[in-house]
Image (cartoon, rainbow, N blue to C red):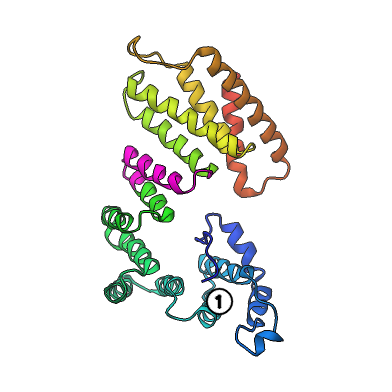
Amino acid sequence: MAAEQDLRPFGEPFKAVKLTQKAQSIVSKASSVATSLPWSLIGAAETPETWVDVVQLFYASLRTGDDKIASACLVLLTKRFGADDHKISGLRGMYQEALAEDEAALKTILGDYNKILAQDPMNTAIYKRRIALLKTLAGPQDAISQLVEFTEAFPTDVEAWSELSELYYSQGLLPQAIFSLEEVLLHTPNAWNIHARLGELEYLNALAVAEGSEAAVKSLTQAIQRFSRSIELCDDCLRAYYGLKLVVTKLLNTRPQSKQIEVQPVAKLQRLDELATSKLRAIVQARAATAVEANKAELMAAQELLDRSTL
C-alpha cells in the first residue's frame, strides 16, 4: 500500500472535523484516478498523497462518527489496493469495530481476527487490531502481554513499541515504559517528540523514588539530556522547554542523600534554567494570539510555570 507513513487516528478532535469538511473533494479526486491500463494513460494522475488523504479522511470520519464517508473511503482504498492488502484488512477491521453495537459484536470481530491470523500470521495490521480490541475487552494487562509477543516477532515496529510504552505508563510501570520508548529511538533517533516524551517519563520516574537518592538524581539528569536533545532537533518545541525548566528547577532544589551522588554543576543548571525560561516566554508570547483552542491549555500551563518561577 502506498501510504506508508504514520496514519493513526487524530488525537485532536478539531483536526478530524476540519478534514471531514474536505470530504467531498478528497473522495471526488480519488474516484477520478484511473489505476489500470489503458485508462491510466488518459485518466487523472495518481500520486501517493491522493491515498494518504483518503486514509486520513477515513480515520477522521470514524472519529467524528460519519460512517458513510468512512465506508466510501474504504471502498476506494479496497478498489485501489485490493481486499487482501494487509493494511486494507486492518482498516476494514477498524471500520467493523466502529460499527459494532455491543460487546458480543466485538467478540465476533475478535474471532474473525483470530481466523485471519491462523491463516496469515504475518498480517501485522490485523495483529495490531486484535491487540487493540483485547485492550478494550480484556484490559491493558492482556494487551501488554500480546504486545510483548508482537515486539519479539517484529522488533522494528516503532508503533508497537510506542503503544507498549503508553500501556506500561498507564499501569505505573515507568522503567518498562522508558525501555520501550528507547527501542523506538533505535529506529527513529531524530524523533524530537519521542525524546521529549522520554524526558517526561524520566522526570516521573524520579518523582516515584526517594527524593535525593541516586536513582532520583540519575533520572532527573537523564530527563535533562532527553529534553535537551529534543530541543536540538526542534528549536521551538514548547513541550521540551517546559520539561527542561521543570526538571532543572527540581534538580536545583534537590539535596543529594550522600556526597557520592554526582549532580550537575549549579552554574550549568542555572544557565539551562535561564535558557528554558527565555525560550518559554518567547514561545508563549508568539503563539498566544494565534493559538487554536486545542493548544491554549499547553500555553496556559507554560505561563503558569513561568509565573511560579517569579514568585
Residue occupying image coordinates x 31% and y 45%: 171
Is there any visible trace of residue 301 in the rendered image? no
Q: Is residue 120 above or below residue 264?
A: below
Q: Where does the magenta region start and end?
A: 168-191
From where the camera sits, is residue 195 visible? yes
Q: Quadrant of residue 80?
A: bottom right
Q: Amino acid at mark 1?
A: Cys
Instruction: Let me know if residue 133 is in the magenta part.
Output: no
**Is residue 15 or residue 293 the one in the foreground?**
15
**In the drawing, does residue 113 fall left or right of residue 263?**
left
Q: Is residue 216 above or below residue 197?
A: above
User: Residue 118 falls in which quadrant of the image?
Assistant: bottom left
Residue drawn at x 69%, y 77% as measured from the top left: 45
The structure residue drawn at horizontal position 41% and vertical position 50%, both measured from the top left corner, is 162
In the displayed structure, does residue 153 sit left or right of residue 20? left
Answer few, some or many: residues within 10 Å of disc 1's Cα (few below 14, many 20 plus, some between 14 and 19): many
Q: Main secondary structure of the magenta part?
A: helix
Left or right of residue 230: residue 101? left
Please name the residue shown 45% across and 70% down the image.
Answer: 87
Instruction: Give the quadrant of residue 133.
Output: bottom left
Q: Dot 1: what SS?
A: helix
- State the residue position of label 1: 73
